[in-house]
């Protein structure tokens, strides 16, 4: 989608169940997340270098720092907003058509990504100028 903005990103509270045995969080398709989960992947042991630096034409995502913390810098071509992810019960819901940079991974950070589509290299925009054109700028 070309017309999404950073205001369409939102942090969701992931259901959690706690008792004296600790915490359990759950994400169920159709209940907690507005898309069908077709793929799960996770980033870990990330060194100083940043990741991301791309947009998706169609794919929607939920990002969760299941361990440690990371900054997701969202960009719609006009405005940017940084989301600091540092709790396993908080998820960043990202609609299609937004640029993201992932920076400042803490030691031991694990960033889990739930995706609405299977892997498709053609869905990626990796050139920022092409992204701006895609957004009509
Ligand atoms: P890449 O898209 O470059 O990572 P980032 O999200 O930081 O931009 O992915 C790194 C490599 O992993 C690349 O060779 C493609 C491969 N890959 C898959 O094969 N399947 C997947 O679902 C993902 C996310 C990546």
Image: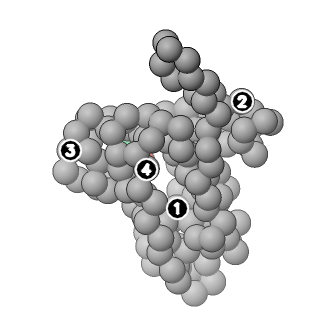
Q: Percent x, y for residue 93? A: 61, 52
Disc 3 residue crowd, few under 14, some 14–19, many 20+, Cα 10 Å: few
Instruction: Give the structural element (helix, strand or loop) at label 1.
Output: strand
1 vs 4, front mark: 4
Which quarter of the image is occupied by the C terminus? bottom right
Closer to the chain start, of discs 4 and 3, is 3
Q: Closer to us: mark 3 or mark 2?
A: 2
Task: Give how far across and how far down residue 84 sits, in percent.
Answer: 41, 56
The residue sitting at 46% across, 60% down in the picture is 83
Q: Residue at x 75, y 45 (%)?
A: 34
Q: Which mark is residue 55?
A: 1
What residue does disc 2 label? 28
Q: Which residue is nearer to you in this view: 77 or 106?
A: 106
Ranked by sequence position, the earlier of labels 4 and 2 is 2
Contact, mark 2 vs mark 1 (Cβ under 8 Å): no
The Cα–Cα distance between marks 4 and 2, rounded to whole angstroms, is 20 Å
Q: Quote the CA–CA distance across marks 1 and 4.
A: 19 Å
Earlier residue among tags 2 and 1: 2
Q: Nearer the viewer, mark 3 or mark 1?
A: 3
Marks 1/4 in contact by CB < 8 Å: the verdict is no
Question: Would residue 132 be found to the left or right of residue 12 on screen?
Answer: left
* Disc 4 target residue: 85
> Circle 3 — which element?
loop
Please tell me which of labels 3 and 1 falls first in the chain.
Answer: 3
What secondary structure is marked by label 2? Answer: loop
- Residue 101, relative to residue 118: is it above or below? below
Residue underneath mark 3: 47
- Quadrant location of the N terminus in the rendered image: bottom right
C-alpha span from label 2 to label 1: 25 Å
Residue 42 lies in quadrant: top left
CA distance for labels 4 and 3 = 17 Å
Residue 39 visible in image: yes
């Amino acid at each position: 989608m070309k017309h999404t903005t950073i205001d369409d990103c939102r942090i969701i509270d992931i259901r959690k169940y706690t008792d004296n045995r600790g915490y359990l969080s759950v994400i169920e398709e159709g209940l907690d997340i507005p898309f069908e989960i077709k793929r799960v992947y996770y980033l870990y042991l990330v060194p100083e270098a940043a990741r991301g630096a791309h947009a998706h034409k169609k794919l929607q995502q939920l990002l969760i720092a299941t361990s440690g913390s990371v900054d997701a810098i969202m960009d719609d071509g006009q405005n940017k907003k940084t989301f600091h992810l540092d709790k396993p019960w908080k998820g960043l819901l990202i609609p299609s058509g937004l640029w993201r940079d992932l920076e400042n991974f803490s030691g031991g950070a694990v960033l889990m990504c739930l995706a609405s589509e299977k892997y498709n290299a053609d869905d990626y925009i990796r050139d920022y100028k092409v992204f701006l054109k895609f957004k009509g700028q």
